Amino acid sequence: MTTYTAPGTQGSVMDYRSRYDHFIGGEYVAPAKGGYFQNPTPVTGQTFTEVARGTSDDVERAIDAAWGAAPTWGRASYEERSGVLLAIADRMERNLEKLAVAESWENGKPVRECLAADIPLAIDHFRYFAGALRGQEGGISQIDQNTVAYHFQEPLGVVGQIIPWNFPILMATWKLAPALAAGNAVVLKPAEQTPASIHVLLETIADLLPTGVLNVVNGFGVEVGKPLASNPRINKVAFTGETTTGRLILQYASENIIPATVELGGKSPNIFFDDVAASRDAFYDKALEGFTMFALNQGEVCTCPSRALIQSGVYEDFLAEGVERTKSIKQGNPLDTETQLGAQASNDQLEKILSYIDIGKQEGAKILTGGERVEMEGDLAGGYYVQPTVFAGHNKQRIFQEEIFGPVVSVASFDDYDDAMKIANDTLYGLGAGVWSRDGNTAYRAGRDIQAGRVWVNNYHSYPAHAAFGGYKQSGIGRENHKMMLDHYQQTKNLLVSY
Ligand code: NAD
């Protein structure tokens, strides 16, 4: 076991600046008029840095810088752009520990996940799009003896990207890698809860990109996100966040008739068929582990399997074991490599989770474990910790229908396949889902019948760069990951030439 030293104290692999400005045109730039806001760590509740509070003036400056860089970057050869992305990936790999500790400290997530998943996935994302871009080369076709059609995938120009706080570096990477590969210049707005992680990433990679290609404006949604997303000088907006904010983003984009990708909320079902318990073997164990995935990243995952549906034949036993497994989740200091459950990302988020636990109780759902705030001791006493919580209830309750975004699962039973599909699809959302069955036909059918953009079958929470990810229904429009993303950040030019 390793416990990483807190950033800013002697011996830490990571030290934050005491102040983060905007990053515009290759330089750190003070806010035009917004001042600075305090940034606390959820691990202890203490402020560790202050961050520039952007306004529309800063957004305009960043868009100017991006337009200064976009034409040259957009015309760079695929080989050159691909080379830059590969260099970014290598640099991140050399700084893996630093990036992981930075994110863990700012977001409260366990450093073991940052080391094993978040940052390696982010690195692979840059490598994947470096390769996918090279795969686009070619594309000339003959129309007739004298005429040739050339197809060019041209960049859109300048894109605005707005990200949430739950996976700061990975969410930035999901947007940056394809946009940059495709030849766009970017203005990125981090979430106000986790801007410093993005600046640590910038310090690691920004010098590898031409000046002005990547710009970051810090600040709040209405003050920075809105003037960015509604700006007539951007050519696309890519957003990840809440469904209510996504609705606004689509309105802004429609004013300027630009494409918008919106990756929004979820209320994902995780379905366990009777046959999971046919034998107490490795498969059964994996399914139990799948049940506890609601607590991964403190439940602050858009695809959190927050509704567990268990078939009636195994409901009692499987649930009892799932509850025991939940109790064994090790909660503690996120910087300790054995910690599995860290701190919620902010006090607001902690309060929201506790309020939903109250709602669940008032609705008559039964708490099987958890349900309380966790008061830590020593340095962690001011941090934002809550117990992993299992409710038993029914799908009409608010805790089954509304996104809690915490380590809370609501469990219900179902009788047969049709019943399972009915409950699973009885939601406004359609982002992720899990299906657990030893029977290939059942698993395949359920995978096709569930209205969600990503269905994990006999696994959960893996996010390879080449697997398309995105929502059905009110979980969003568009996709991320997969080489199709290059198309989303490009426009097709056809040149039809007679010789
Ligand atoms: P949020 O919508 O409150 O904020 C997201 C970002 O939008 C932040 O940077 C915020 O400052 C900005 N913003 C807020 N109001 C804005 C406005 N009017 N105009 C422009 N920008 C604005 O979401 P959050 O609380 O940061 O993130 C949690 C949500 O994100 C959850 O609903 C979760 O499901 C969702 N999420 C979805 C995915 C996905 O891929 N579908 C991934 C991660 C998180």
Image: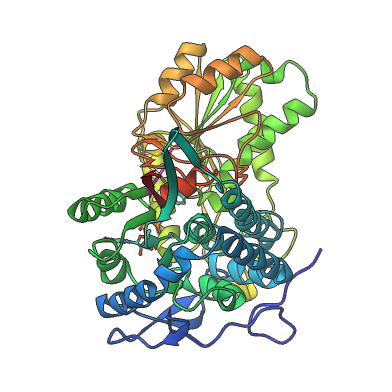
**Image point 45% across, 43% down: which residue?**
479
Residues in magenta, as a range: 262-267
Q: Toward the viewer: 122 or 176?
A: 176
Which residue is pictured at 64% across the width and 79% down the height?
7
Identify the residue shown where x is 45% and y is 86%.
28
Please indicate whether residue 56 sits to the left or right of residue 271 in the image.
left
| Quarter of the image where ligand 1 sits | bottom left
**Who is closer to the viewer here, 132 or 152?**
152
The N terminus lies in quadrant: bottom right
Q: Is residue 177 left or right of residue 245?
A: right
Figure coloring:
rainbow
Residue 389 visible in the snapshot: yes
426 is higher (above) or lower (below) than 312: below
Which corner quadrant of the image does residue 66 belong to? bottom left
Q: Residue furthest left?
A: 255
Q: Position of residue 283 (x, y in %)?
A: 75, 26
Residue 226 lies, in percent from the top left, at 26, 64
Q: Main secondary structure of the magenta part?
A: loop
- Name the residue nearer the viewer: 82 or 395: 82
Q: Is residue 35 magenta?
A: no
Residue 309 lies left or right of residue 334; in this view the side is: left
**Quick check: 324 above or below 387?**
above
Q: Is residue 191 visible?
A: no
- Magenta span has 265? yes
Q: Position of residue 448 (x, y in %)?
A: 50, 21
Position of 496 relative to 456 (above/below)? below
Q: Residue at x 26, y 49 (%)?
A: 250
**Horizontal and vertical percent position of residue 383:** 54, 68
